[in-house]
Image (spheres, rainbow, N blue to C red):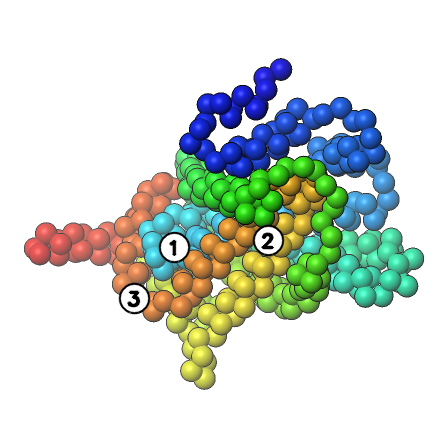
Amino acid sequence: MFKFRTLLAFAPIIPRAIIRSVIGFAETSIWPQPICSREKGRHLTSLVLTVRETLRYRGAIGQWSWVLHRLTGVGVVLFLALHVIDTSWAVFYPALYVKAIAAYQSPLFTLGEFGLVFAVVYHAFNGVRIVIFDYRPELWRYQSGAAVAVLIVTLLVLAPVFLGMAGHVLDFYFTEQAIASDKLLDVVVFSIIEQLPFIAGFVGALAAAIVLAALYGMIRDGGSTVAGKYPEASPIERFWWAFMRLSGILILPLVFGHLALMHVVQGVFDITAAQQVAGTLQENGSIGPVPTAVEFVYHRWTYTAWGVFVWRVYDLFLLVLVTLHGFNGLRYVLTDYTSFHPFARRISAALCTVIAAVLLAVGAAALFVPIEKDIVGEALAATAEIYELRGEEVPAELEAYLTGALEGDAEE
């Protein structure tokens, strides 16, 4: 078997603590050591083992609600990362935002939207169940019934929600025939390609997390990778435990309000429709020659009531609470499966911290910067490209606008 420690002889310029960290993780994870004691036996706690034993065990409702809570939480966090970044593009890169919304209006993401809404609703209701039993442990004998009740309530809530969402889908694909049948494959491929920047961003975040984890290990314990016991509770961890419960309750009205406005009252297909923007007094298409996703965001974030940018404040609270709650929950999940691999555990914590910090910074920047009407004009060329991609005829008023803009640039 190849010995990782030979790497030390070939990397004199790399800090030895970093190499020791990588070696320790690789030797205990890639090639697991023989299990010869109870302590080493705990190394078997892995994601693969959890999934395999869960499927084999076929346990009671409590086990399945635990699995479903984790899966739905991870799914929501992954979408959150996409959503925060692409929404910021409406301000910083309007053309990219137009393409992002076009990807969300594709068949692939249409199916994903239904899964997302299920994940949010179930995770929210099951989170309330967890909070209640955490603070009232004497009710634990009712946990199986409560888990069933959560599932039933979720399905009852989703029934009318899915009907409303299905109405938007049918109008878009069949009544309006917004995508030509011979262009469906092109649109699906386009929606997949549009996700490549996010994959590159994740790889960059992972690289940063590895570096931070190695530096932290060097500073704290010289890069030791000796497996130890589960991390002990600390005042910080007790704070995060309480925060997860409190934030989970505070998020409920914000998230359900957002779902109602952006997925039921006006779905993703209505973002580019000529109609009043929900929660404002403005109509999409009143600035540009045709309605666009960027103009939708402009009207929403410039709407004021009593001198307050209502939706900016709303979205700011939603951004902070959901990002901190979501990525701290993801940290719990990842560190559960890396508790006996110190370097991997540090990478997990650093990765969640890096991504959460980036999302908070980018999202807050988009909410706080002044928004000018010019962003609507910057999105129109990309809007014309989307019409052509879908096999639709570019509206005459849009063609006239773009032609005039080109002639104006030529004169200058």
Residue 195: image quadrant is top left
Please determine whether, in this image, residue 292 is positioned above or below residue 3. Answer: below
Q: How many marks?
A: 3
Q: Is residue 92 left or right of residue 162?
A: left
Residue closest to the far left: 411
What amino acid type is highlighted by mark number 2?
Phe
Q: Residue at x 47, y 48 (%)?
A: 105
Residue 338: image quadrant is top right
Pick the front one: 400 or 410: 410
Q: Nearer the viewer, mark 2 or mark 1?
A: 2
Residue 373 marker: 3
Rounded to the nearest angstrom, the CA distance separating label 2 from label 1 is 22 Å
User: On the image, numbered disc 2 is attached to which residue?
Assistant: 327
User: On the image, numbered disc 1 is attached to which residue?
Assistant: 89
| Quadrant holding the N terminus | top right
Q: Residue at x 54, y 68 (%)?
A: 317
Residue 357 visible in the current orientation: yes
Residue 191 locus on image (x, y percent):
45, 40
